Structures are given as C-alpha cells and as structure tokens.
Amino acid sequence: MSKQISCLEMINRIEYPIDELEHHKRQQAIDLVRKELSTDGCAVIRKFFSKAGLNALLSEAHELREQAYYSPKKQCNVYLGDITPAMTEDNPQNIFLERSNGFITADLFGEESASRRLYYWEPLKRFLADCLEKEELFIYEDPVSNMIVNVAKPGQRFNWHFDTNDGVVSLMLQTADDGGEFEYAPYIRNELDEN
Ligand SMILES: [Fe+2]
C-alpha cells in the first residue's frame, strides 16, 4: 500500500488546483463539467491525476486484484434482477447479458491506503459537489461497497444496467489494451416511464 503520497500529490494540481477554492482553473474545470453534463449527461475530466498519484492508486488495485469478488451470477438484466415470467421473452426485463467482471471491495483497502484517503478527502468531495451543483455530497458509509475498484480481465464485461443512484463518479485507473468500450444512454427514462 502507498502510505507516503498525500492526496494533494495525487492530483495534477497544475491543471486542477481543486484545493484552492478561488483558483480560476478550478472554476474552469467545474464550468466544463457542468456544460458537458447538461449536454449529454456525462463529463470526462482528463489527466486529473499526477503520475505518482495514478501509480499509487493503480499499484494498490494491482496488489488486491486477486482478492476481487466475482459474483456467481454471470447473466444479468438491466435491473441486475431475475427473470420476470409475467413478461414476454423479448421484454427488456427478460434480456440477460454477461456480467463477468470483478470488484475489489472497499473493506480490502487499509485505512492508510491512497485510495481510501482520497475517497474521504474533503477537497475532492467539495470539488465534485460543485461540479454536480450539489450543496454537499455525503460519504456512503457502507464498508463493503462505498469505494470499489472494477476489475476486468481480457474478455470480461459488465452488462448494461440501470444505476440505482442519481449519478456515478468513476476514476479510470487503467484503460483496456483493446476494446474496453463504455456505452451509456442518457435521458432514456423518467419517473413515469422506464422506457
Ligand atoms: Fe453503473
């Protein structure tokens, strides 16, 4: 585990001085995220980590990857649920796709790990809240699933699914050598129509 690097050192502070609330570059980054979110529901912050920061997070994930949890349930629908006999076979609820990726659960990361410290780091939380135009973000205290690392070996995949939360913040630690497409479809459902 990387204990030495501070949260500040993990961030590319030249481009993203997120701890300096009045810095114009911080505001620029927030404005860009808000614009992208309002356009298509997804925003990408590029080169957010410093090289050392990315290495620290990545090496922790590598150390723990053999302990990743793989669900015994390999076929899932968009609700990660079961077959609905009352629905027709071609109903989206009855369409099952492969979900074979693994998860390094939060409880595997030590208190002093770079990953855990970053998750609880106030300036990052404040920055993300500002990006998302929320007054405050709250820590999800579930010790197993509050901060997970998604692990995909060659050929593994995570099926199409609806998230159960309003949004997701993902940190890309390592891109796929090949493939690795991320697909999403914004604004396809509302409170009255699952579409
Ligand atoms: Fe998701």
Image (cartoon, rainbow, N blue to C red):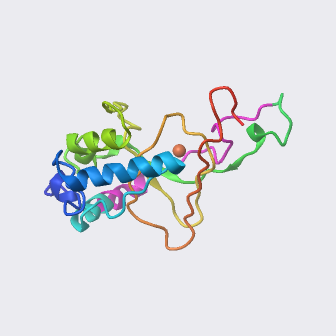
Quadrant where the N terminus is found in the figure: bottom left
Magenta segment includes 80: yes
Which percent across, then down, holds residue 33?
39, 51
Q: Residue at x 32, y 61 (%)?
A: 58
Q: Which of 3 and 89 is in front in this view?
A: 89
Q: Nearer the viewer, residue 105 or 189?
A: 189
Q: Which residue is drawn at 29% across and 58% down?
A: 57
Q: Which of 2 and 187 is in front in this view?
A: 187
Count of labels in the image = 0
Span colored in magenta: 59-84
Q: Residue at x 29, y 63 (%)?
A: 54
State the residue lying farthest toward the right.
Answer: 88
Task: Determine whether 130 is above or below 103 in the image.
Answer: above
Which percent across, then down, holds residue 38?
48, 45
Image side of residue 137 versus residue 21, left or right: right
The answer to whether any part of residue 192 appears in the image is: yes
The answer to whether any part of residue 68 appears in the image is: no
Q: Tell me the quarter of the picture where residue 126 sits.
A: top left
State the residue lying farthest toward the bottom.
Answer: 177
Magenta segment includes 112: no
Image side of residue 165 versus residue 99, left or right: left
Which percent across, then down, holds residue 128?
32, 43
Quadrant where the C terminus is found in the figure: top right
Which percent across, then down, holds residue 41?
51, 47
Task: Determine whether 193 is above or below 92 in the image.
Answer: above
